[in-house]
Image (spheres, helix red, strand yellow):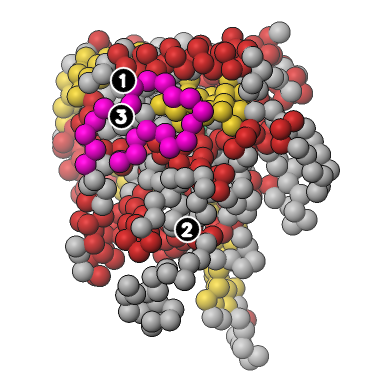
Amino acid sequence: MRYSAYRIDRARLIEAINMLGPGFDVRVAPHLETGESGPGENMVKTFMFPQPEVLFTFKKAPPTADDVDLLREPSLPHTTTLLFGIRPCDARSIHLNGLAYEEDTYFWHRIEGAIIVGYLCKTVLSTCFCQRVGSGPDDTRYMDVVMMDVEGDHDALLLHGITEKGMIFLSQELGPLLIKCGGAKEEIEQSLGSRQYPKDTNTLDTLLSSDLMALYNAPFWDQLKDGCLNCGICTFRCPTCYCFDIQDETLGAKGRRIRYWDSCMFPLFTQHASGHNPRGGKIFRVRNRFMHKLKYFPDRFGAISCVGCGRCVRDCPVNIDIREVLDNLLEVARS
Amino acid sequence: MLEVTGQHRECQEQLRKRARDLLASGEIAAFIGYGNGSLPWVPRPIVVRSPEEADRLVWNSFLTLNLANYLPGVLKELEPPRRRGEQVDPSTLPRVGIVATGCWSRNIVIQVQENQVDRSRVHIIGISSRGMISRHSFKQALGGKEALKIVENDHEIEVTLSHGETMVLSRWEYVRPNCKTCIHPGPVVSDETIGPPPGRRLVDERFREIEEVEAKDSQGRWEWFEEAFKDCIRCYACRNACPLCYCPTCFVDDSRPQWVGKSIETPDALTFHILRAYHCAGRCTDCGACESVCPVGIPMRLLTKKLIKEAQMLFDWEPGMSLEEAPLLGSFSPDDPDIAILKGGEKGT
Ligand code: SF4
Ligand code: SF4
Ligand code: SF4
Ligand code: SF4
Ligand code: SF4
């Protein structure tokens, strides 16, 4: 049997991570060292959606050009990206975005070449609400390896392989660099067993069974939009906001096609070439962001397109709070 | 939750009363102010549309957005639909109330000068600002902990953190640099004022922040610029929070011609910032809204502040000080100093 349960020293783990070979692109969340609560900086988003992402390069062909150089796909990296310290909410965002990016080669190339080393939450922030949207601080489902704190001992961490990929990585790459301590398996089982957060499935069911137009026409949108700046903060901070725009950039005879983040909060997002904008007013754009996450996406994919990380709540400069929007929608749905 | 005592508490009570009266008498149809939000340090800009709702209004030291930003939109929303080119007598249109500090009122003056706002449709309640607190330095002071409750007194901010810990901060220490060096904290135009006049000693140190950057050589300034602006994520919150930015199509959104690249790579981000700053030349009031809303702490306000300094030195100009003046860039005087065009780069007199 593969050895896939470890109790290790935090500082030693960070040393071991730094000793991994050049085949790995290692990214470590700062809270792995500090133990700070909350999802932290958005490593997963910038990994899933590089900003900007070069889709291909091209050049103008001279009359006798050799066709191979006309259009060139980027060389996709063959390194394994290691994402260390990913919270359950962020790990789950990869799964949710995958539903919408089902056929996107670039996205899947990155995801398949990655190992998600998750880190369960010991405490939650006041703005965390993963439990309301179908997950929880103990959710290990979307991780290859899971790490967790040891009660009363900041220096210790438990590590446990979950997927085949995670177990192989642990036993063949990271494991040999670690000093194992006995008893980890029981301790992990006990630790996981003690983290039983109740999950809320009622929210999703209520949203799914509600009438789309009743939610769309609810009166609260009108007040909600008042303060909104229609900026990109909430969407750019959000791990489950995945909309993009595409642009060709040229310099002389050469060029590249890039994909970069866009936001449904921007008027340009829906601007037609004719000049007409179907989401011309602020209210349409604000409503779209929340309806997409809480109704359109669930209707289509069976899950809420929000992992409850609370980043948009914390960073919105005018305090538009998706938890209140959710409450308002549920109230309409139940009436 | 955010509670206030002292001077701000009095302002808050009078503000609620006046907004309620104005809405009840029908003098105004809506009032633009701040209400409490779900996080104690982020009050929420709100539009109050009925006298009963006036008690939602709050006044404290955390009001870092410039409410003038919402004024043209709310005025427009209240106009009945009309055909293109159809003239309407403004005196028949609903009026809007707004609370304004010094810089907010100066931005309203600019909106009037630039024909974005009809002065006769606005009722301004002026309050002298005691300086607003920087969210960035407030967050830093908490050292990664969460503020669950704030009680603001005249000179102290009491913060309740998670696990029942408390912390007392001296208010002035966390006031934004633009507020600390502001020489016009009181409203320059208003229909009525509430609260005491500015109580603090006003020292003109407006350009100290700029002088530090100016003291560098050109290489040093370039390095400062690249380093300070490289983390911009192009969310445009700074642009959207600014009352000066009302173009239906912003230059960053133009595609023919495309003035600036769309990525967050450094040359594109820097170009965006230089152009944005220049669009605010002779207009920026240093209200600090742009800097306050930025999620990554870019000091873009220093670019516009440099232009404030230029306009001050060359034209003795301060934006938004009087409704009677024509805007700096919209007027010409034969006495204007000529630093580039006729005298070929020499500094004019
Ligand atoms: S939202 Fe949940 S999973 Fe994410 S950081 Fe907070 S507690 Fe952890
Ligand atoms: S909800 Fe907040 S963060 Fe999102 S666009 Fe509006 S103002 Fe910006
Ligand atoms: S909508 Fe907000 S809380 Fe939900 S995943 Fe996005 S940033 Fe996190
Ligand atoms: S540029 Fe910034 S400081 Fe100047 S008026 Fe606009 S928001 Fe205020
Ligand atoms: S400077 Fe800040 S607010 Fe402005 S676009 Fe960049 S990240 Fe957004």
The three-letter amino acid code for the residue at tag 2 is Leu
Q: Is residue A87 left or right of residue A233?
A: left
- The residue at which mark 2 appears reads as B328
Helix, strand or loop at disc 1?
A: strand
Viewer-side residue, B153 vs B6: B6
Which chain's residue wears label 3?
B
CB atoms at circles 1 and 2 under 8 Å apart? Answer: no
The N terminus of chain B sits in image quarter: top left
Decide: few, some or many residues near mark 1? Use Cα within 10 Å; few <14, some 14-19, many ≥20. Answer: many
Point out the tag, 1 or 2, that comes first from the N-terminus: 1
**Number of on-image labels:** 3
Q: Secondary structure at mark 2?
A: helix
- Check contact, mark 1 vs mark 3: CB within 8 A: no
Q: Which residue is painted at 68% across and 36% down in the image?
A: B76
The amino acid pointed to by label 3 is: Pro
Q: Which residue is mark 3?
A: B198
Q: Is residue B140 above or below residue A256?
A: above
Residue A307 appearing in the image: no
Percent coordinates x, y for residue A318 in the rendering: 47, 30
Q: Earlier in the sequence, mark 3 or mark 2?
A: 3
Region in magenta: B182-203
Instruction: Name the residue located 54 percent from the left edge and 60 percent from the top edge.
Output: B330
- The residue identified by callout 1 is B147
In the image, residue B228 lies at what x, y percent?
Answer: 30, 54
